[in-house]
Amino acid sequence: MRAWAVGSSGARNLRRRGARSSWHSAHVEIERVGRPGRAVGRHPIRYAARAAGLHAQTLRDYERRGLLRPARTDGGMRLFSDDDVARARRIAELSAEGVPLTATQRILRLERLLRLLFARIRTLEDQNARLSARLQRQQVGARPSAGC
């Protein structure tokens, strides 16, 4: 997978290569940038702010406080994933309820941990069901036949 470095003139350069429009091209090419183990950052800050219903400066503030960690291009442009946008919405909801940002960070960390634990429980339950079915099949196959 090839990562594109889209700097301040990146959209202009993409247009020169025959793209439809500068925003569309930058948005499409940005989809290729991301960090291993994280959702791919693909939205420029103006789109992410609009999608989250916030101002771009608010997203920058959340990043500065460690609440958001968007991916960055080689040129330093912030790229927000869909998960980042959803997280920004959640931060805004908690802020609207009067929760301080330091407490918001803890709440988000605990919510993430809870999701991970529930996923682990589901995995273990599935594994248990498979092992129980396997054990039952082995016990049925090991029984001596009644006609001997």
Image (tube, grey):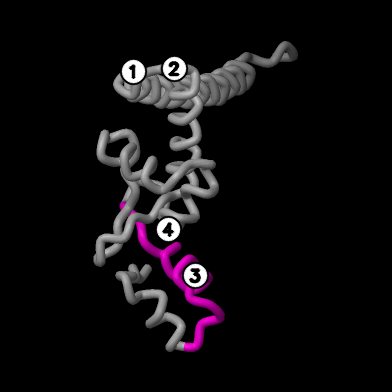
Q: Quadrant of residue 60?
A: top left
Sequence-earlier tag: 3 or 1? 3
Sequence-earlier tag: 2 or 1? 2
Amino acid under label 3? Trp
Helix, strand or loop at label 3? It is helix
Indicate whether residue 34 is drawn in magenta: yes
User: Which residue shows up at 53% across the image and 42% down it?
Assistant: 53
User: Which residue shows up at 33% across the image and 20% down it?
Assistant: 106
Mark 3 touches mark 4? (CB < 8 Å): yes
Q: CA distance from mark 3 to mark 1?
A: 36 Å
Amino acid under label 1? Ala
Residue 132 vertical position relative to residue 42 in the rendered view, above or below = above
Q: Which residue is mark 3?
A: 23
Amino acid under label 2? Gly
Work out whether residue 27 or residue 140 is closer to the camera in this orientation and state it: 27
Q: CA distance from mark 2 to mark 3?
A: 36 Å
Indicate whether residue 147 is drawn in magenta: no
Sequence-earlier tag: 4 or 2? 4
User: Which residue shows up at 53% across the image and 70% down it?
Assistant: 24
Mark 4 touches mark 2? (CB < 8 Å): no
Q: Quadrant of residue 126?
A: top right
Helix, strand or loop at label 1? It is helix
Quadrant in which the C terminus appears: top right
- Binning the other alpha carbons within 10 Å of mark 4 as few (below 14), some (14 to 19) or many (20 upward) gives many
Q: Which residue is mark 1?
A: 103
Q: Which residue is mark 2?
A: 98
Q: CA distance from mark 2 to mark 1?
A: 10 Å
